[in-house]
Amino acid sequence: MKKSIFTIPNLLSFFRLCLIPLIVIAYLREYYQEATILLVISGVTDTLDGFIARHFHQISDFGKLIDPVADKLTLAAVVFALLLHHKQLLVTMGVLIVKESLSLIAAYILYHRGVRPSESKSFGKLSTLSLYLVSFIIMITDIAEVTLAPWLIWSMVGLTCLCMILAMFQYYPIYIGIIRGNYNIETEQFEGDPTK
């Protein structure tokens, strides 16, 4: 029986997509407090939809698609908005664009082979969390009208970029394994030697 896409986790992901323009508009109009609150709500619903999906058996293929899409679009939009006042994030945006472009290419290749991509992994979630945290911290400083020391901003930029780069290198063997047929997307495990 085909699962309905109208599950609570999927509706929460739709809700996060709807929050994206609200966050960006609020930030661009310098309603920093409102933008920060909306970002926190987005992050909380992201955690909540995963919890509900796992504990109430509402995991679906559609959910595995829309949840990371909502994450990626939210973070890309927020980082882009923050760039207006924090030019150091240009490096973060560049790495984010490369990472997500490679993910899209990999997903496109798998789609044309009739195979769905692997679900999100812990290292990918860590990358997402680091971006959420850095965005939150910067938005809090905007509210408080505090200027962070350049070394601190560059440290946060370096951390997020490192997390994204590590995620790219850890996802790579999984995509190759799926293409070669030695990675089972149902069990999310390699079967045999992942290097072959």
Image: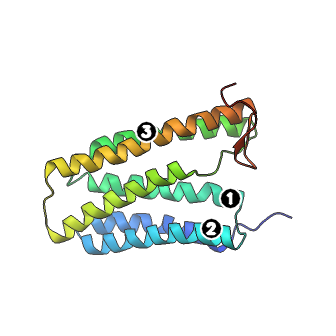
Marks 3 and 1 sit apart, C-alpha to C-alpha, by: 26 Å
Q: Residue furthest top?
A: 196
- The reply to whether the C-beta atoms of the residues labelled 3 and 1 are less than 8 Å apart is no
What residue type is disc 1 on? Phe
- Label 1 secondary element: helix
Front residue (pair 104, 26): 104
Which amino acid type is marked by label 2? Asn
Residue 54's spot in the image, x, y percent?
A: 66, 67
Above or below, 184 against 196 in this view is below
Whole-Å distance between the Cαs marked 2 and 1? 8 Å
Q: Is residue 127 left or right of residue 174?
A: left
Q: Earlier in the sequence, mark 2 or mark 1?
A: 2
Amino acid beneath label 3: Ile
Q: Which residue is mark 2?
A: 10
> Which residue sits at x=14%, y=67%?
145
Q: Which quadrant of the figure has residue 38?
A: bottom left
**Residue plotted at (49% across, 38% down):** 168
**Residue 52's quadrant in the figure?**
bottom right
Measured as percent of width and height from the top left, residue 137 is found at 27, 63
The residue labelled by disc 3 is 165
Examine the rendered structure and indicate whether residue 95 appears above or below residue 186: above
Q: CA distance from mark 2 to mark 3?
A: 28 Å
Q: Which quarter of the figure is the N terminus placed in?
A: bottom right
| Side of 14 relative to 183 (left or right) | left
Disc on the earlier residue, 3 or 1? 1
Decide: is 109 above or below 85: above
Secondary element under disc 2, as helix, strand or loop, is helix
Residue 87 in sight here? no
